[in-house]
Image: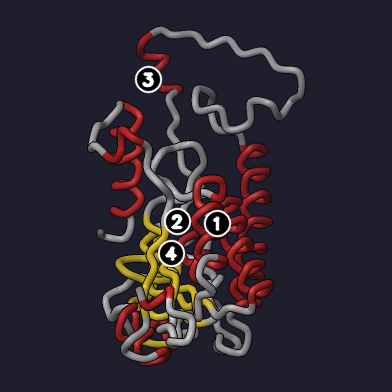
Amino acid sequence: MIDRIPFLKKPLCVSVLRLSGVIATGQRGQLNDATLAPAIERAFRKGKPAAVALVINSPGGSPVQSSLIAARIRRLATEKEIPVYAFVEDVAASGGYWLATAADEIYADESSILGSIGVISAGFGLTGLMEKLGVERRVHTAGKSKSMMDPFQPEKPADVKRLKALQEDIHAAFKTQVTTRRAGKLPEGEDLFTGDIWLGRAAIEKGLADGIGHLVPVIKDKYGDKVRFRVYGAKRGVLGRFGLRLMSDAITTIEERAEYARFGL
C-alpha cells in the first residue's frame, strides 16, 4: 500500500540474485547465461534497486558461462550505475569465484571456501578394459586432431600438449578477470593463480574478499534497517516445482555432488 502513495518516502530496495549450483549449459537447475539472463535483467531493472546482492554458492564449471554471466552483471551495473555486492555461502571456487568478481565488494563467512583460480580437465582411459573385453573400436576422421583425447585410444603426448595450451589460454583469461576486478587489492609478488583455495579470513588477507559478513546485516548496515529485499533466480520448470525427477536430473545431481565434494562439501 505504501508503494502506491506518492508523497510517502519508499524504503530502499536491494535486489538479491541467487547463484547456486554448478555452472554449465543445457541442464535444468544449473547456472548458465541463457537461464539466468531474465532474472539478472529483472534484478537490475525492476523497482530501481539501490544495489544488487549476489548470493553465491558454486564450485564452478564452464569458464565461458562464468564469463558470460559475470559480463552481463557488470554491463548492467555500469549501465544502471548500481553497486553490486557478493556474499559467498559454502563455496565460490573456480567459476564460482569468477562470478564473485562481478561484484564491487565480496563478503564471505569465516568457513566459506574461495579461490581455485585455475583450469581442470578430467576424464577416463578405457583402452585396457576394451582389450580385456575383446572390443575393437573403429574411428575414421577428416582432420588429424578430430579425435584428440579420445578416451578409447591410448593418450598421445601431442594431444596432451594441445590440451594444456588450451588450458593456459583459459587460465590467462581467468587471471585477467581477477586482476582487473580486484585491482589494488591483491598482494604484489604473490601467485594466487595456482588453483589453491582459502577460507574466509585467509581469502581477505589474499585480497580475494573484502570482509566477513552475511547478506542481511551487511546490507542493513549500508542501507538502513528498513531496506527491503527482492529475491531473483532462475525459474524451475513445472516438474521441478512439484519435486518430480527425471533421469537427467538424477545424473545432474550426481555430477553436482562430485563437484562440491572436491572441496569437502
* Amino acid marked by disc 3: Leu
Image quadrant in which the N terminus is located = bottom left
Image quadrant in which the C terminus is located = bottom left
Cβ atoms under marks 3 and 2 closer than 8 Å:
no
Question: Which of the 4 image quarters holds residue 113?
Answer: bottom left
* Amino acid marked by disc 2: Gly
Cβ atoms under marks 1 and 2 closer than 8 Å:
yes
The residue mark sitting in front, 1 or 4, is 4
Residue at image mark 1: 66
Q: Earlier in the sequence, mark 1 or mark 3?
A: 1
Q: Mark number for residue 83?
A: none
Most foreground residue, 30 or 132: 30
Q: Mark number for residue 17?
A: 4
Q: Earlier in the sequence, mark 4 or mark 2?
A: 4
Question: Which of the 4 image quarters holds residue 142?
Answer: top right
* Amino acid marked by disc 1: Ser
Residue at image mark 3: 129
Whole-number angstrom distance, CA of label 1 to CA of label 3: 36 Å
Whole-number angstrom distance, CA of label 3 to CA of label 2: 31 Å
Q: Earlier in the sequence, mark 4 or mark 3?
A: 4
Q: Residues within 10 Å of mark 3 (few under 14, many from 20)?
A: few
Residue at image mark 2: 60
